[in-house]
Image: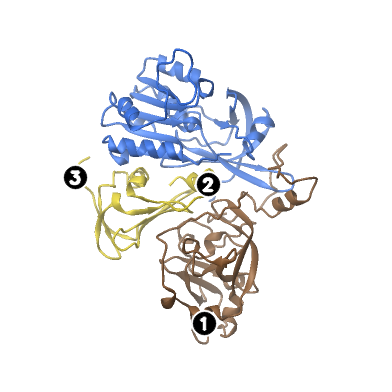
Chain colours: A brown, B blue, C yellow
């Protein structure tokens, strides 16, 4: 990627509480290229909101693992969870800083199973049929979690509740709503949007929106 | 094969109204566009912070090697105040495009043509009207243009000229908040009754394009369907309530 | 779908479902003919429905058209700077009405 052209005289939005440096500069620094900041949480969907009753909900890890594992809702809630405060960027250009979630790290989910030596990819599948793909390396080491609370309350169905994947370092389409399973594999499988022209990796800092970016 | 950002040079600046300004961008590598398409504009600060905005192309494709965009200055916006207050001829701006395959009209598609605009939604429709005039095929076309007041009518003079050309184009204005003395045109928001009156001489074979705020576009699309226009003959482009 | 609909000009708001008429022009340009009055057979459940009655989700990275009977994906359209991608795996057959 070559040097970026700098637009003469452009400095960006002046935030109300800006002085020299300080808060406004820090918020801008945290905004990936091409994004605008919002305090909203827009609802964007590819289909009707699934409404799986909790007594029928389960989360499964399978594929290239020593033994597949499935948690019921109660079992999932009993797993060690923590609070996460992360910045989220959607490919539709909104970025929301400091979104507060509660959820279970993917590391925790994978703790009790052994991954096959060939394991390299995680394919998330969801109620409603949505899928997305990530290299295993992108979801380990506290880079991804399965969230069940947002902003101190149970995750609303239109935002992916009861539980969704959250991968803060990638465009939000990778944070699969209504997640029900993660399949570990040795081959990459482009998911719902990846197979239609969106970038396979989706790093918002490299502005990987579309394939070919 | 991603389309790269191009560098365009501002070769002209023109005030359309007190709050609306047009910019001509010279683009030597431009491959051309279709009326109704838009470009993405990217602005980058020295620290790497960047923003992108989309702007409809206002100019007709017959003007090769350059495009016009028309930008309304939004109070508190991040980009439009910059474009209005800082950018001068000679400045260069990053541009990507043309983008869009749906909200497009070319003279070959024929008519009759109904162009319904709300405020700055007139921009892509102006590209269509300008192209229509240059194509010279005499497609019957009518623009229904909603603005808040006479001082806010974008392209007012040019629209008068296009209508006076006698080649089958006319403009019906509705001024929703302020009207000049002696005004006997429409003075309210677009509604189904107005659409019926405006559509009547054009007939059932009309192709309609509506662009503007979401609420206006939805009123127009629903109204035209109820008036019997087939849905596939109605194309819409919505600007959200906050275009900055 | 106009990519712009998903860009910042749109007010971030609750997802709105529309029907196939909302994308009648888009699909018309994809298929080079009017299709909202065409009968589309869902590849999942084999139900035939008028395209104009299919459920359309268009806020988000792309346009998703779903079967009104079983809600499975019938069509997907994504517009990127390099062109438009159309996935019609969900349509088993499209039957177009005669004439125009």
**Residue reaching furthest left?**
C98
> Is residue B74 positioned above or below C52 on the image?
above
**Helix, strand, or loop for circle 3?**
loop
> Is residue B211 positioned above or below C66 on the image?
above
> What residue is at 57 percent from the left and 80 percent from the top?
A79
In the image: residue A120, left or right of residue C33: right
Please provide percent x and percent y for residue C82.
50, 48
CA gap between label 1 and label 2 equals: 40 Å
Q: Nearer the viewer, residue A21 or B186?
A: B186
Res. B195 in view? yes
**Residue reaching furthest bottom?**
A66
Subunit ID for the residue under disc 2: C
Q: Are marks 3 and 2 on the same chain?
A: yes
**Helix, strand, or loop for circle 2?**
loop
**Helix, strand, or loop for circle 1?**
helix
Q: Report the disc number at residue C7.
A: 2
Classify the position of the C terminus of chain A by image quarter.
bottom right
Q: Tell me the mark number nearer the camera, choosing from 3 and 1.
A: 1
Please provide percent x and percent y for residue C41.
26, 59
**Residue that mark 3 sits on:** C98
Q: Tell me the mark number nearer the camera, choosing from 3 and 2.
A: 2
CA gap between label 3 and label 1 equals: 57 Å
Please provide percent x and percent y for residue A191.
47, 65
CA gap between label 3 and label 2 equals: 38 Å
> What residue is at 51 percent from the left and 30 percent from the top?
B58
Q: Report the disc number at residue A75.
A: 1
Q: Earlier in the sequence, mark 3 or mark 2?
A: 2
User: Is disc 2 surrounded by few (<14), some (14 to 19) or many (20+) residues within 10 Å?
Assistant: many
Q: Report the disc number at residue A23.
A: none
Q: Nearer the viewer, residue A74 or A193?
A: A74
> Is residue B85 positioned above or below A57 on the image?
above
């Amino acid at each position: 990627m070559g040097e970026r052209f700098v637009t003469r005289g452009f400095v960006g939005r002046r935030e109300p509480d800006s002085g020299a440096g300080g808060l406004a500069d820090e918020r801008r620094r945290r905004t990936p290229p091409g994004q605008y900041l919002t305090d909203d949480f827009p609802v964007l969907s590819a289909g009707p909101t699934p409404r799986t009753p909790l007594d029928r909900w389960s989360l499964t890890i399978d594929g290239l693992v020593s033994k597949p594992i499935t948690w019921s809702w109660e079992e999932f809630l009993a797993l060690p969870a923590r609070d996460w405060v992360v910045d989220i960027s959607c490919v539709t250009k909104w970025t929301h800083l400091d979104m507060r979630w509660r959820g279970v790290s993917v590391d925790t989910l994978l703790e009790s199973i052994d991954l096959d030596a060939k394991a390299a990819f995680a394919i998330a599948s969801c109620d409603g049929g949505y899928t997305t793909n990530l290299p295993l390396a992108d979801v380990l080491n506290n880079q991804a979690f399965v969230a069940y609370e947002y902003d101190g309350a149970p995750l609303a169905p239109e935002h992916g509740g009861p539980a969704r994947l959250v991968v803060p370092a990638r465009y939000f389409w990778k944070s699969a709503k209504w997640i029900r399973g993660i399949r570990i594999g040795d081959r990459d499988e482009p998911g719902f949007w990846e197979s239609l022209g969106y970038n396979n990796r989706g790093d918002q800092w490299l502005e990987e929106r579309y394939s070919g970016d | 094969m991603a389309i790269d950002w191009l560098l365009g040079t501002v070769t002209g600046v023109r005030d359309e109204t007190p709050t609306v300004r047009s910019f001509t961008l010279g683009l030597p590598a431009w491959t051309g566009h279709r009326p109704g398409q838009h470009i993405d504009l990217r602005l980058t600060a020295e620290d790497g912070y960047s923003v992108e905005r989309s702007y409809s192309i206002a100019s007709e494709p017959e003007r090769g090697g350059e495009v016009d965009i028309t930008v309304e200055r939004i109070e508190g916006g991040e980009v439009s105040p910059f474009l209005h207050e800082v950018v001068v001829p000679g400045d260069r701006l990053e541009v990507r495009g043309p983008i869009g395959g749906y909200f497009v009209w070319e003279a070959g598609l024929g008519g009759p043509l109904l162009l319904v605009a709300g405020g700055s939604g007139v921009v892509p429709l102006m590209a269509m009207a300008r192209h229509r005039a240059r194509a010279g095929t005499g497609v019957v076309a009518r623009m229904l243009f909603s603005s808040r007041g006479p001082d806010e009518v974008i392209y007012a003079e040019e629209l008068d000229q296009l209508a006076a050309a006698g080649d089958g184009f006319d403009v019906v204005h509705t001024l929703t908040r302020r009207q000049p003395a002696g005004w006997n045109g429409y003075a309210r928001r677009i509604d189904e009754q107005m659409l019926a009156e405006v559509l009547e001489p054009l007939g059932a074979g009309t192709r309609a394009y509506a662009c503007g705020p979401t609420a206006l576009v939805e009123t127009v699309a629903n109204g035209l369907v109820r008036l019997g226009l087939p849905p596939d003959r109605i194309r819409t482009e919505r600007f959200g309530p906050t275009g900055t | 779908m106009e990519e712009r609909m998903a860009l910042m000009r749109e007010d971030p708001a609750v997802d709105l479902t529309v029907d196939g008429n909302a994308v009648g022009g888009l699909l018309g340009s994809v298929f080079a003919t009017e299709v909202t009055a065409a009968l589309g057979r869902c590849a999942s459940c084999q139900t035939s429905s008028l395209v104009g009655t299919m459920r359309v989700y268009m806020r988000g990275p792309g346009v998703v058209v779903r079967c009104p009977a079983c809600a499975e994906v019938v069509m997907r359209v994504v517009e990127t700077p390099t062109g438009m991608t159309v996935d019609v795996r969900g349509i088993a057959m499209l039957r177009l009405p005669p004439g125009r």
